[in-house]
Image (cartoon, rainbow, N blue to C red):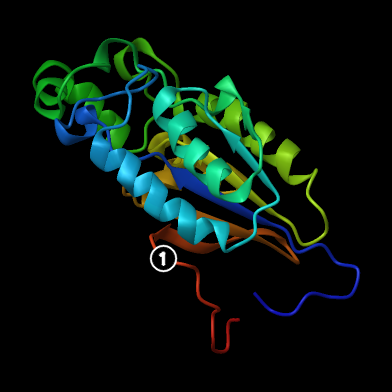
């Protein structure tokens, strides 16, 4: 990001996906099902927490599902910051899809899956629309971001689908194009920075510390 104008806020939002779960390994749709981290997932969270702590975050807010809450706890242990938990940051509720593997979803709900991938508004398994997820999650993220000091950093610990829809909403993208934002690997994160025309995507699916952009578009 370019140098901030004097008196101009330059806040950052780090959206951090939870660590690995057994359902991730099985390619099983989790949704709002409360699945805990694997041992590898805990190790991922500890490694990433040490990296993110060097960004000197000012606040942490997390989904109340265990996989996100336990990931956030690792950053809290390093930074000494409290974690606020909010159910609005949970993963998409996907009704009958939850608990099914990817192959089972394709076999039972192939047309619905294809429509979703085409960008059509689909209640997967009778659950939430992606826009409804953004409706509940994005305002919570903004509420916490607005509490930050002028150049503060907020870490949001959530889930892949919720993070993607929240980023899309905060960037002002049409819902149809949210799929263009690639998925997040377990315990990787995306960084939004406050610019002159609103929020900007500075890093996506990062697993190391963000580096400054050097060039004509910094």
Expressed as whole percent of the image width and height from the top left, the position of residue 145 reads 72, 45
Residue 51's place in the image compared with 159, above or below, is below
**Identity of the residue drawn at 19% across and 23% down:** 111
Q: Secondary structure at mark 1?
A: loop
**Identity of the residue drawn at 54% across and 89% down:** 215
Residues 93 and 16: in front is 16
**Identity of the residue drawn at 66% across and 36% down:** 82
Horizontal side of 133 relative to 205 (left or right) equals right
Residue 93 falls in which quadrant of the image? top left
Q: Is residue 27 visible?
A: yes
Expressed as whole percent of the image width and height from the top left, the position of residue 70 reads 44, 32
Q: Which residue is mark 1?
A: 208
Expressed as whole percent of the image width and height from the top left, the position of residue 23 reads 21, 27
Horizontal side of 54 relative to 22 (left or right) equals right
How many circles with numbers are drawn on the protein? 1
Residue 118's place in the image compared with 212, above or below, is above
Quadrant that contains the N terminus: bottom right
Residues 113 and 86: in front is 86
Quadrant that contains the C terminus: bottom right
Residues 194 and 111: in front is 194
Residue 31 falls in which quadrant of the image? top left
Horizontal side of 76 relative to 69 (left or right) equals right
């Amino acid at each position: 990001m370019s140098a901030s104008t004097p008196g101009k806020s330059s806040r950052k939002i780090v959206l951090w996906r939870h660590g690995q779960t057994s359902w991730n390994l099985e390619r099983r749709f989790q949704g709002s099902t409360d699945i805990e981290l694997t041992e590898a997932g805990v190790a991922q969270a500890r490694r990433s927490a040490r990296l993110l702590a060097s960004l000197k975050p000012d606040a942490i807010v997390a989904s109340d599902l265990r996989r996100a809450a336990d990931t956030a706890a690792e950053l809290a242990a390093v930074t000494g910051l409290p974690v606020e938990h909010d159910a609005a940051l949970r993963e998409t509720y996907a009704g009958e899809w939850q608990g099914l593997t990817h192959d089972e979803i394709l076999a039972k709900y192939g047309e619905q899956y294809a429509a979703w991938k085409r960008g059509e508004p689909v209640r997967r398994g009778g659950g939430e629309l992606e826009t409804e997820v953004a409706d509940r999650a994005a305002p919570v993220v903004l509420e916490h971001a607005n509490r930050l000091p002028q150049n503060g950093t907020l870490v949001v610990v959530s889930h892949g689908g919720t993070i993607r829809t929240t980023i899309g909403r905060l960037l002002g993208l049409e819902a149809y194009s949210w799929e263009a934002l690639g998925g997040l690997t377990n315990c990787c994160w995306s960084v939004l920075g406050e610019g002159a025309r609103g929020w900007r995507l500075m890093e996506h699916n990062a697993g190391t510390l963000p580096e400054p952009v050097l060039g004509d578009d910094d």
